[in-house]
Image (cartoon, helix red, strand yellow):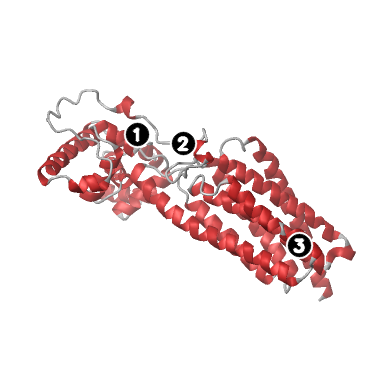
Amino acid sequence: MEHEMFTLEAIAHYTRGATTLFYIFWSVLLQKYRHRNRMMRLLHLASVLLAICYIKDFVFLIDDLKYSEYLNDLAGIIDMLYLPVIASFFLEVAKPGAVSDRTMYLYIVIQSAFVPLYVIFPIDAVCMFAEFLAYIVSATTVVYITIFVIKYRRRMFEHYSYTENIDVRWVMFSCYAYFAALLLYSLSFGSTTWISETGFNIVGMLLWAIVFRMASRHRVMRMLAARTDASKDSNVIVENDIAESIIPEDNAEFDSEESAEDICNQSDYKKMNMKNMMARETLIRKRLDYVMTERKLYLSPKITVMDLAAAIGTNKTYLSLFLNNNLHMAFYDFVNKYRIDEACRIMGEMTDNHKMMMTEVAAASGFNSLSSFNRYFIKIKGISPSEYLNANKKIK
């Protein structure tokens, strides 16, 4: 039994050392990316704090200090200092500026106050209050990240025809996984110290490797941005203005005294009299049909609702309302339905002498990636593109 515990302890120390090097490596690597935007600055700061916390734990390699309950409790309180930074990072991805720097540092100051308090009064009550505050921060972050991601994705589908590098589900799942692992680790600490620490270190490295990877590719969007200093970040990306290069200049064939005037909110949309509404809807349908079937705007992989609205002479708010209220679909579904139809047409024209790879079919249909093409094709047709192609060959 003693030998088994020694082995577990050795493994725990090895994983702790590997985890320390892991966070040091990312702290150095993210140094050059931290100026990209606030999200990367927070991720860099979180990496630095995590590295410091792990370096601190090397004191427990000293045999006389290894089992000191006082030092273990003090180290646990210090470890909680990085939670506000990690929470701010998660929230920043979904809603830039959701947590200001002032608020984040205020939480850090409050959390750090438990360190000298425990030094002066080394009692369990101090640890309990520190843990309670950490749990409050964690639980609040989980609730808010869920709300923000749901709202973000709804607006994403209303404004964009693609999801590559702008979807934020990854940060929600990462948030859930991290705080769940942290909770399990804190609950198991004491009874299975070495096992829980080893598991937490391994899970932490795997999780943060995914976070670092996804964050480096993620494009920060302002769909839910708060009015803070973060919203002034010059690196925050807004809708792509590509409409002018693909939209016909001559709209003379849409000869009508009615124009798709800017309608800025839903209440105005509903208050329009029936006659004018029907006339505008007819005009919008006609223009949409033209730009989608004749000009094939959907072939632009990064077309946005702003681009399409500009093409038909209206604004993105009216167009979104029209698609939702009349066609009962978001902009994302509207555009990708045309792309799937185009893909089916391309595959239908394939012959043994003229074949295309599925990646080529996806690109020729306007999709940004093969994964998005496969996922949406299955959603619409119920089968994969390959299965559709094989079935089409049998019919021929």
Percent x, y for residue 122? 79, 68
Residue receiving disc 1: 300
Q: CA–CA distance between discs 1 and 2?
A: 18 Å
Q: Secondary structure at mark 2?
A: loop
Image check: 394 left or right of 147? left
Between 253 and 80, the one lying in front of the other is 80
**Counting other residues with Cα less than 10 Å from the Cα at mark 1, is it few (<14), some (14-19), or many (20 or more)?**
some
What residue is at 36 percent from the left and 47 percent from the top?
157
Q: Secondary structure at mark 1?
A: loop
Instruction: Residue at the far right: name it.
Output: 64
Between 157 and 38, the one lying in front of the other is 38
Percent x, y for residue 148? 45, 53
Residue receiving disc 2: 237
Q: Nearer the viewer, mark 1 or mark 2?
A: 2
Image check: 292 left or right of 136? left
Q: State whether residue 262 appears in this view.
A: yes
Percent x, y for residue 184? 63, 68
Identify the amino acid type marked 3. Answer: Leu
Identify the amino acid type marked 2. Answer: Ile
**Mark 3 and 1 residues: CB-CB less than 8 Å, in contact?**
no
Q: Is residue 367 above or below residue 7?
A: above
Image check: 215 left or right of 19? left
Q: Nearer the viewer, mark 3 or mark 1?
A: 3
Percent x, y for residue 43? 61, 46
Mark sitting earlier along the chain (1/2): 2
Residue 117 numbered tag = 3
Which quadrant would residue 263 be assigned to in this image? Answer: top left
Instruction: Residue at the far bottom: name it.
Output: 1
Identify the amino acid type marked 1. Answer: Ser
Between 150 and 199, the one lying in front of the other is 150
Mark sitting earlier along the chain (3/1): 3
